[in-house]
Amino acid sequence: MKAIVILLVFSAMSYSLTEFKEQKTYNTKSGYLAAVDEESYDKMMNYIVEKDMEALDILMKHEKVIMLKEGLQVYLVKVSWGKVIIRPKGHDLKLWTVSEAIE
């Protein structure tokens, strides 16, 4: 029984890895922010929680955080606890955002 469970877990993991390698494109939703690096993402999230819009504005003025446009085609690079790293199709740029920002 234990072997069957382990086999099922590995099968599910293999399927999800295969699907991830296919480089499916997603579309961004409007109204979401994205950061150019993980440090800026962490700051952005802290400022949003603290409701410190002045500090968030500084990140945006220094182009560390941008507002996502609706319908931008992106590839999913990495997923981690509600945070995703995406790469816009045709660009060599990675963006950190929340998983809800893509569909």
Image (cartoon, rainbow, N blue to C red):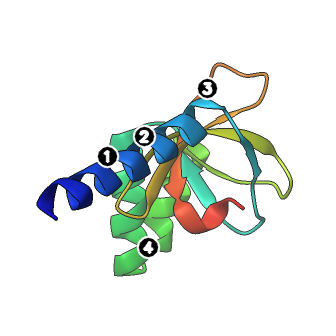
Kind of residue sitting beneath label 1: Phe
Disc 1 and disc 3: Cα gap in Å?
Answer: 32 Å
Callout 2 crowding tier (Cα within 10 Å): few <14, some 14–19, many ≥20: few
What residue is rendered at 24% in x and 61% in y? 5
Do callouts 1 and 3 mark residues in contact (Cβ within 8 Å)? Answer: no
Considering the numbered disc 2 on the image, is that residue within a helix, a strand or a loop? helix
Callout 4 crowding tier (Cα within 10 Å): few <14, some 14–19, many ≥20: few
Q: Which residue is mark 3?
A: 93
Q: Which mark is residue 10?
A: 1
Q: Which residue is mark 4?
A: 48
Of circles 4 and 3, which is in front?
3
Of circles 4 and 2, which is in front?
2
Kind of residue sitting beneath label 3: Leu
Q: Relative to 50, is 63 on the left or the right?
A: right
Instruction: Using the image as rendered, state which of residue 44 and residue 14 is in the foreground.
Output: 14
Q: Which residue is mark 2?
A: 14
Do callouts 4 and 1 mark residues in contact (Cβ within 8 Å)? Answer: no
Considering the numbered disc 1 on the image, is that residue within a helix, a strand or a loop? helix
